[in-house]
Amino acid sequence: MTLGEKLKKARINKNFTQEYLAEVLNVSQKTYSNFENDKSKPDFHQVEDIAKVLEVSVLDFLTGDNITVNQNNNEVAIAQNYATINVSEKLIEQYEQRLKDKDEEIAYLKQLLDKKKS
């Protein structure tokens, strides 16, 4: 199954329109339609955004039969349930910072809950 076919199937399962996903991604409906019809490929961050909105794992889109996704003008080949993604050090740092921020937020919210329980 191609990336476009997977995008379409996941969108339909959530009863979303192409227009809605295009709006979420801040692209035209035609651009999003081209993703689903495999006429163009979304950037990796767009795949992440689509996965979040459709409540599926990014890996669901990126694993399988020879799918290709654009990432900063470098194409990432993904073949038979194995994803090879060249991620820059900067991107890794950004994700690590996000995780740290989320951990701090969770700790803060736990403190608030503990105070409410007391």
Image (spheres, grey):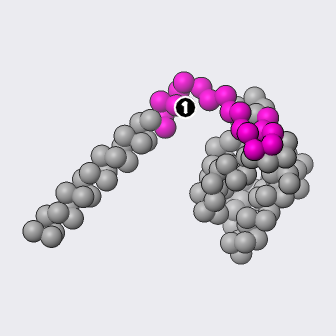
Name the amino acid, label 1. Leu
Segment tinted magenta in the rendering: 77-95
Report the residue marked by disc 1.
Answer: 91
Relative to residue 112, is residue 39 drawn left or right?
right
Residue at position x 71%, y 59% in the image: 22
Q: Position of residue 68 (x, y in %)?
A: 81, 40
Q: Quadrant of the N terminus?
A: bottom right
User: In the picture, residue 54 is in which quadrant?
Assistant: bottom right
Outermost residue toward the top in this view: 89
> Which picture quadrant has residue 88?
top right
Residue 50 screen position, x and y as percent? 66, 56
Instruction: Please tell me which residue lies in front, 61 or 36.
Output: 61
The structure residue drawn at horizontal position 71% and vertical position 33%, both measured from the top left corner, is 84
Residue 60 percent location from the top left of the image: 70, 53
Q: Residue at x 54, y 24 (%)?
A: 89
Looking at the rendered image, the quarter that the C terminus falls into is: bottom left
Q: Nearer the viewer, residue 56 or 74?
A: 56
Image point (42%, 42%), residue name:
99
**Foreground of the two, 26 or 50:** 50
Query: From where the camera sits, is residue 36 visible?
Result: no
Q: Depth check: give the residue in front, 87 or 81.
A: 81
Does residue 32 lie above or below 94 as drawn?
below
Residue 83 drawn in magenta: yes
The answer to whether 104 appears left or right of 47 in the picture is: left
Indicate the secondary structure of the residue bearing disc 1. helix
